[in-house]
Amino acid sequence: MTPARWRVETPRQAAGAIALITVRSAGLDAVIDQLGIAPLAPGDRRPADLLGIDHAVVARPTPDRLLLMPHAGHAVLRALESRLAEALGPEDRAGPEALRDRLTDALARAHSPRAIDLLLDQPRRWSEAGLDPAGDPLGAAIETDRVAPPTLNRLITPPTIAAVGPPNVGKSTLLNALAGRQLAIARDEHGTTRDHVGAELVLDALAVRWLDAPGLMDRPDPTDCAAIELALEAVRSADLVCLCGDAAAAPPDPAELGIRAQTLRLALRTDLAEPGWAADLRLSAPPDGSRPRGLSELAELARRTLVPDADLDDPRPWAFWTADSDA
């Protein structure tokens, strides 16, 4: 096998008609022959059958560089990647190019506005740290604390916040206020929310998935009991749980519900009466129907709990391609 380096230059998440694959080798004539392409002189370009997979344009701009321009369909690229790996060895994904590919993918998937500037600064940070991002993302750099904490991954994959508490304490009203529209039915009747309701919100520039669980009743009927247990399964897997209550009903005990995530105790409807229990935050819905008070404070508190300021300000490089792992 003639030594050669090849890589797919087209971002894998980008849509387009034509892809670009580069091949570099000091013995490029032999590589061209290995790929079943007719001899190509430096400066030449022409259509060619590419490994029996696709009709492509091939070009040789310099003596040691070959450009392959097939169709950009995912199936075509996957097949070409497999055949090129068989013919020339593994794709060269080291160094800055590897970081660029990961950055393109992360920018396409990032939900939080806070992620953008931080992601765009990563090439500089990785370069100044003298680290190679092409290696195992959970390898030596992370083990030696040379990268930023994984809580930053929540800027790419939205964390889940669950609101749970007794019925008729204002959880659905809170969701509707945060969303700026009616997503959940809010009435002064027990059992109005029978099934959990979800929505994606942006709280202090952090995208989150908000889960509004049905009210926890002392003696639920069989239908309510099934809905509550189903919702509690989702609540237990949340990244942050808001334990809600009001002056008439205290929030639930997280230990009794099997909740191990971080929690916030929210006192709702404080415009009607002040609760007799300690709360992390008090919120109120003014009787004139104006926007409830305390929403911006809740947004900032939730964001700081999930992604602390110290993590956002951490100057170390961020292994953002591990965003699908646990934060």
Image (cartoon, grey):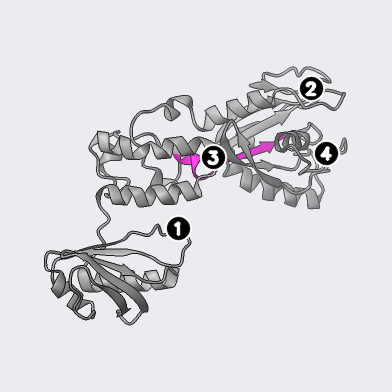
> What number is the disc on residue 186?
4
Q: Is residue 95 left or right of residue 159?
A: left
Q: Which residue is mark 1?
A: 13
Callout 1 environment at 10 Å: few (<14), some (14 to 19), or many (20+)? few
Residue 191: give x, y in percent of width and height: 83, 43
In depth, the one of 311 and 98 nearer the eye is 98
Q: CA distance from mark 1 to mark 2?
A: 51 Å
Quadrant in the picture for residue 313: top left
Residue 167 is one of the magenta-drawn residues: no
Residue type beneath disc 1:
Gln
Quadrant in the picture for residue 87: bottom left
Q: Earlier in the sequence, mark 1 or mark 2?
A: 1
Q: Answer whether labels 1 and 4 touch (C-beta < 8 Å).
A: no
Q: Quadrant of the N terminus?
A: bottom left
Quadrant in the picture for residue 159: top right
Callout 4 environment at 10 Å: few (<14), some (14 to 19), or many (20+)? some
> What number is the disc on residue 247?
2
Residue 160 is one of the magenta-drawn residues: yes
Q: Which residue is mark 3?
A: 112
Q: Is residue 252 visible?
A: no
Q: Which mark is nearer the camera, 3 or 1?
A: 1
